[in-house]
Image (tube, helix red, strand yellow):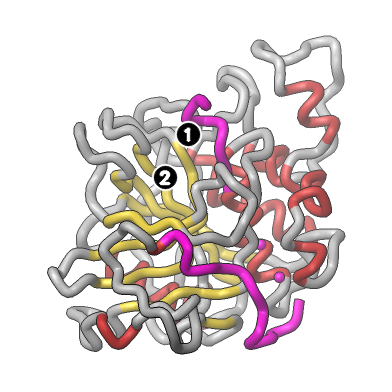
Amino acid sequence: MPAYQASVAPAEDDENLPGASGDGLAGTGFPLSTSGTGLNGFAAAALPQGGAGYARSWDLLSGVPAYQWYHGCGPTAAASVLGYYDVHGYPQYFNAQGWDAVSQMQDVEDQISSPAHNVKYDPTPDDAALPVPPETSLADFLHTSENPLGYGSTYLSNMAPGIEAYAAMRGAPVVAWSEDATASTWTEITQQILGDHPMIFLVDTNGDGITDHFVPVFGFATRPDGSDWFAAYTTWHENESVDWFQFKPMAAGNDWGVGYVTFVDPAGTAGASSAPVGSPGASAGKAACASGFVDPQTASAGLPAVGNHWLA
């Protein structure tokens, strides 16, 4: 499957809400136990209980829907993030309501990428005979697959403003912005997750030094050896089995190296009120899924809780 064929969302605050399982921890070096509560017996006590620059060394949000890649990794990843907010107090983002519906991609696919968008922009080049479709889906606002991009691709410079525009259209604004992924960004990532805010990473899945895929991110952990790891869905499966990857820079030979982070905060929360709005930035090379970035300064401490954690 080409790297771009992968992708990237819940109403009441229910501590029993499903959304992530421990299956993806196997083989990552994280300890697993056969008994206990929480993430399929994930042995949280085996992880360090302190961390430099953040209050906890691990956390994992529950109630994040996993969607199979649908006409672009950008809109798919964005849908998982907005889907989380949708079932945690912001039910405007999808026509579907409640976890049982929002967790099923078939119930939200028209909000990920509309039929009109698919018909016009799936071909390469775009079908010039068809009118420009109305902006009703994430793919419309992210300009996914639109010339000069090929099928499924999205510029990173369109992610933050596109997510903001879609959320505003649905009646529940967010503040979104993108940053380079650096060692210093890790602290902000952990603070956001501790504040119940999932996000989107732009990664290099095959270690060729070029970004090629957007994924939703909703957990972090520091292993006993001091290495930092993040929890994500690859968007290559529609089940809530967590995939863990080491947080490392994008570089030749670093599979799943992280190039950029797009943060998405519900408007009016403490984190969002001080975070600048993302805007189109300079081109940063081109990959199957996305390119381009913005890099504003942000502040995200003291984020309010709006959702659930597996390991609270």
Mark 2 and mark 1 residues within 8 Å of each other at the beta carbon: yes
Judge from the rendering whether residue 179 lies leftward or rightward of residue 139; answer left or right.
left
Where is 37 relative to 276, above or below? below
Query: In the depicted view, which residue is nearer to us: 81 or 180?
Result: 81
Hey, which quadrant is residue 153 in on the image?
top right
Q: Is residue 177 visible?
A: no
Q: Secondary structure at mark 2?
A: strand
- Residue carrying label 2: 202
Residue 110, percent from left and from top: 81, 44
Residue 237, percent from left and from top: 59, 46
Q: Identify residue type, mark 2.
A: Leu
Which region is colored magenta?
A: 1-24
Judge from the rendering whether residue 139 lies leftward or rightward of residue 287; answer left or right.
right
Query: In the depicted view, which residue is nearer to us: 17 or 211?
Result: 17
Question: Residue at (85%, 30%) from the top-left corner?
Answer: 116
Q: Is residue 123 visible?
A: yes
Q: Earlier in the sequence, mark 2 or mark 1?
A: 2
Judge from the rendering whether residue 98 lies leftward or rightward of residue 277; answer left or right.
right
Label 2, label 1: how many angstroms apart (C-alpha)? Answer: 8 Å
Q: Identify residue type, mark 1.
A: Ala
Question: Residue at (42%, 27%) from the top-left corner?
Answer: 287
Q: Which mark is residue 290?
A: 1
Residue 259, percent from left and from top: 32, 45
Question: Residue at (29%, 44%) from the top-left corner?
Answer: 257
Badge 2: residue crowd in 10 Å (few <14, some 14–19, many ≥20): many
